[in-house]
């Protein structure tokens, strides 16, 4: 049986990791992201790699034998998917000096602590460019909360303009999109 502080840490860390995975699955309005593109990939890789370890520590701390065995089986089942996710994230991670070619910043406008940023999206050779307007709130340690607000497929140019009650996505004098603030 592990020391009490190890058990508490394992349970708390596993709960935090599961909460982060649930946040991604539930598609909540704001998603935490790092300002560094590479850090997002490495965070996914680290969380996926540490999940089975935490699950084994939690399983080891369960006092009832039948429940502990069931938890060990569950932790064992989680290992392969977590290793695959972690491996894919590491292989796809750009170098820290590289920029993200899938999201190119075109324009931004700030309203207090909130920044509205318009990105040109590029998923590769099999699709056309698109535009995505995001609401971003900067937090400490290079973390930001990101909420997609508007998107348009098959578009490559635009600019953000703030009005009193809305955010406009403009191309020249044409309004491509209007989002309430």
Image: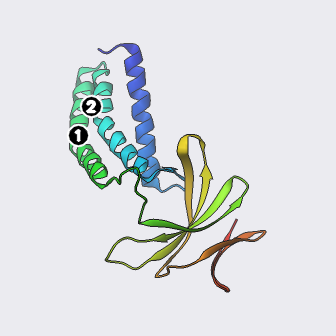
Asked if 73 appears above or below 180 in the picture, the reply is above
User: In the displayed structure, does residue 53 sit left or right of residue 16?
Assistant: left
Asked if 115 appears above or below 121 in the picture, the reply is above
Q: Secondary structure at mark 2?
A: helix
Q: Nearer the viewer, residue 7 or 85?
A: 85
Asked if 131 appears above or below 134 in the picture, the reply is below
Q: Nearer the viewer, residue 72 or 102?
A: 102
Q: Quadrant of the N terminus?
A: top left
User: In the displayed structure, does residue 37 sit left or right of residue 78?
Assistant: right
Q: Which mark is residue 79?
A: 1
Asked if 179 appears above or below 138 in the picture, the reply is below
* Residue 127: quarter of image: bottom left
* Residue 78: quarter of image: top left
Q: Residue at x 29, y 31 (%)?
A: 53
Disc 2 versus disc 1: nearer the observer: 1
Colouring = rainbow
User: In the displayed structure, does residue 78 sit left or right of residue 102?
Assistant: left
Q: Position of residue 169 (x, y in %)?
A: 63, 76
Q: Position of residue 63 (x, y in %)?
A: 30, 18
Task: Confirm or deny contact between disc 2 and disc 1 (CB under 8 A).
Answer: no
What's the distance in space between the residues labelled 2 and 1, CA to CA?
13 Å
Which residue in the rendered view is the most extreme toward the right? Answer: 164
Residue that mark 2 sits on:
71
Q: Position of residue 79 (x, y in %)?
A: 23, 40
Q: Position of residue 167 (x, y in %)?
A: 68, 70
Q: Residue at x 27, y 44 (%)?
A: 82
Badge 2: few (under 14), some or many (20 or more) residues near its Cα, within 10 Å? many
Q: Which mark is residue 33?
A: none
Q: Earlier in the sequence, mark 2 or mark 1?
A: 2
Q: Quadrant of the C terminus?
A: bottom right
Q: Residue at x 78, y 69 (%)?
A: 164
Q: Secondary structure at mark 1?
A: helix
């Amino acid at each position: 049986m592990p020391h009490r502080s190890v058990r508490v840490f394992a349970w708390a860390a596993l709960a935090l990791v599961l909460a982060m995975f649930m946040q991604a699955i539930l598609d909540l309005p704001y998603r935490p992201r790092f300002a560094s593109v590479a850090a997002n990939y490495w965070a996914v890789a680290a969380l996926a790699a540490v999940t089975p370890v935490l699950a084994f520590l939690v399983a080891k701390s369960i006092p009832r034998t039948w429940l502990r065995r069931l938890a060990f089986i569950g932790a064992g089942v989680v290992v392969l998917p977590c290793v695959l996710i972690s491996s894919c994230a590491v292989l796809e991670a750009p170098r820290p000096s590289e920029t993200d070619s899938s999201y190119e910043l075109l324009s931004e406008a700030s309203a207090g602590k909130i920044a509205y940023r318009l990105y040109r999206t590029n998923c590769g050779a099999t699709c056309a460019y698109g535009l995505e307007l995001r609401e971003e709130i900067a937090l400490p340690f290079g973390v930001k909360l990101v909420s997609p607000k508007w998107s348009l497929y098959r578009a490559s140019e635009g600019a953000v303009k703030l009005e009193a009650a809305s955010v406009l996505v403009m191309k020249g004098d044409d309004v491509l999109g209007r989002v309430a603030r």
